[in-house]
Image (tube, rainbow, N blue to C red):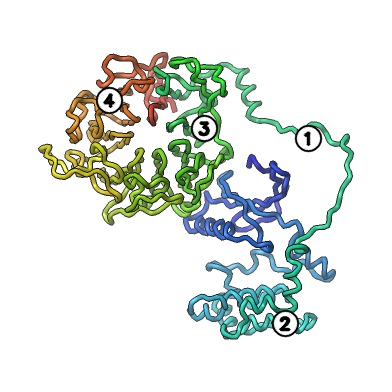
Amino acid sequence: MEKYEKIRVVGRGAYGTVHLCCRLSDRKLVIIKQIPVEQMTKEERQAALNEVKVLSMLHHPNIIEYYENFLEDKALMIVMEYAQGGTLLEYLQSRNENLLEEEVLSSKSKAYTVVGTPCYISPELCEGKPYNQKSDIWALGCVLYELASLKRAFEAANLPALILKIMRGTFSPISDQYSEELRSLILSMLHLDPARRPHINQIMACPIIINALINLHTDTGKVACVRVHRPLSNLPGSSRSRTSVRGVGLARDGMVGKPRALSSVLCWGGGLTQPTRLPLPSPDTQVVQVAAGRTQRAAVTKHGRLFVWEPVGMGGEIALPGALDSGHSALIPRYLEGQAAVTIQHVACGDLFTACLTDRGILMTYGSGVHGCLGHGNYSDVTQAKIVEALLGYEVVQVSCGASHVLAVTNEHEIFAWGRGDNAGRLGLGNEESSPAPQPVAVPDDVRPCSVHCGVDCSVIRTLDGALLCCGSNRNNKLALDQITAEGVLERLVEEVHVLTPVASAPISNMQVQVVAVGTSHTAVVNAEGKCYTFGSNQFRQLGFDKEPQDRRPGLLRALTSYSITTVACGDTFTVAVTDAGDIFSWGKSARGRLGRLDDEPGVPKKVAINGEDPFSIVSISCSHGNTLVAIRPILRSGSPIE
């Protein structure tokens, strides 16, 4: 709601609250409908999504205009045009002084739990016949009757009685205070025989209708201008200022002693040659997950808040310690705007865009819309996190971002993909076409995906039983799609696939995989025994062992067989692994601080030294391009992490 200021509540309903707001950019009055999607079922979410879709498709002077939607305070906020002429009730009262408010039906009176409003269902629909335009004419006739009579044409105590009335076409006559032309028009629209109802063009040609159409663009909804003269001297200077609660909090924090931090986030790469501690929003911030992109660094807190790190300034006046040059600007944390009351549980970063997931399975994206990777059905950039409307009817449990494409998995083991699809068919849709909106990805009936993992030009899904299916580029066998026997015999070489295909290279094809990490040109997995296997390009020894360039076989990382690996992450030309003892190992290309250590043997897995930290446990790790982010949590003397 940073762009809007609430003025007052103008209505409440079963599914939300309607606010009159002021748009701060141009001081225009708008209506914001607040729908609490966090408390809705899947079907109710889909109904809310349908409302947004219908509104966005309608463009007519007599229809309220749709502006945008966003998530705020665990609710879907739909921003619409404000009709300043007042309500229909107010208009009728201005034309008839004897009209009582109770005579006008409220928006929720006689509501029914069926799709649509049963009072307006046509007789042919009651008989189960196909829906057609004449059914819309019937519904329009019901609305005109209601406006003229101040009651519905067909009402009953229960649904069967209502259906019976509709099929018989029995309703009270229209008052003779209305012209014969209007009464005849309404009666013709409520004819039981659809063929005898008028077409919309015939209705618009009626004399009583065409006069209103002529003045449609000039008179409808006009409001008399009443100018109130107010001396400028009466306006208090403080009325235009806005208090920053966050600023007050920061000042207060500076007055107290520095408490022990509950979390630390370290970064290296991109010019940082050693692990460097990043500032957190406050000492009590507890980070549970981090995500790195080409330029982004994001984190999720224990309390479900998402924040990002941004450079101090364009000039790079302050440099991070450990940077290769003084031009590497320091980073400051900033909470994501507009999400203060939304519980974020997961974040993923692509190239210049970010996806975040709430604890109720609602997916939001923001950033660069190039290649349609935001999933909003277009290629526009978005500065504030926006709901991926196409997935509002699903409960997303995990999302992964590649450089320019995204995969998501739902609680019902459905896979959706969108973004860039060329160069090997990384979306798994059977072609190389891009898609700006989520598309369902076909998986075999016996496969139950539980996690998704995107590379630069490929995708991997992991199933509940630890199997892997892949699509996209298999260059250097980085997806283990080559048919390689347990004896190491290459039976079939695969360069790319356009649909999700099971891995075929031993021993990965027979392995129960627990962790998957996909880099630019190589992949690393961890099995149930805590052993790490790597495959793909070994140009910079990012696989952690020596092998011939033509050898496409996956290999065991023997240098770490004495350790139990808990997680692994892959960058562009390097790999990072974490052990159950909390040790961090890195290997591969060392340029620009990729490994977080200075060593003469970059291709050999060696520990990354974390200096100046108490005993800690690794909470989350993420690599992207040449950058690494690690979230750690201090361990108490008792041996347990701080909660």
Q: CA distance from mark 3 to mark 4?
A: 33 Å
In three-dimensional space, the C-alpha distance between marks 2 and 4, rounded to whole angstroms, equals 84 Å
The x and y percentages for residue 403 are: 40, 38
- In the picture, which quadrant includes the C terminus? top left
Q: Characterize the local packing of mark 3: few (<14), some (14-19) or many (20 or more) Cα atoms within 10 angstroms.
A: many
Between marks 3 and 4 in the image, the one whose residue lies nearer the viewer: 4
Q: Residue at x 39, y 45 (%)?
A: 407
Classed neighbour count for the residue bearing mark 2: other residues with Cα under 10 Å, few (<14), some (14–19), many (≥20)? some
Residue 307 shows which numbered tag?
3
Residue bearing mark 4? 540
Q: Amino acid at mark 1?
A: Ser
Numbered circle sitting on residue 239 = 1
Q: Which of the two discs, 3 and 4, labels the residue nearer the N terminus?
A: 3
Q: In the rendered image of this protein, does residue 179 appear above or below residue 578?
A: below
Instruction: Name the secondary structure under disc 4.
Output: loop
Task: Please tell me the numbered disc located at residue 183.
Answer: 2
- Looking at the image, the residue that sits furthest to the left is 487
Q: Marks 2 and 4: which is nearer the front?
A: 4
> Do tag 1 and tag 2 residues touch (Cβ < 8 Å)?
no
Q: Nearer the viewer, residue 628 or 105?
A: 628
Q: Earlier in the sequence, mark 1 or mark 2?
A: 2
Q: Judging from the image, what secondary structure is the residue with disc 1 in?
A: helix
Q: Quadrant of residue 582?
A: top left
Q: Residue at x 51, y 35 (%)?
A: 306
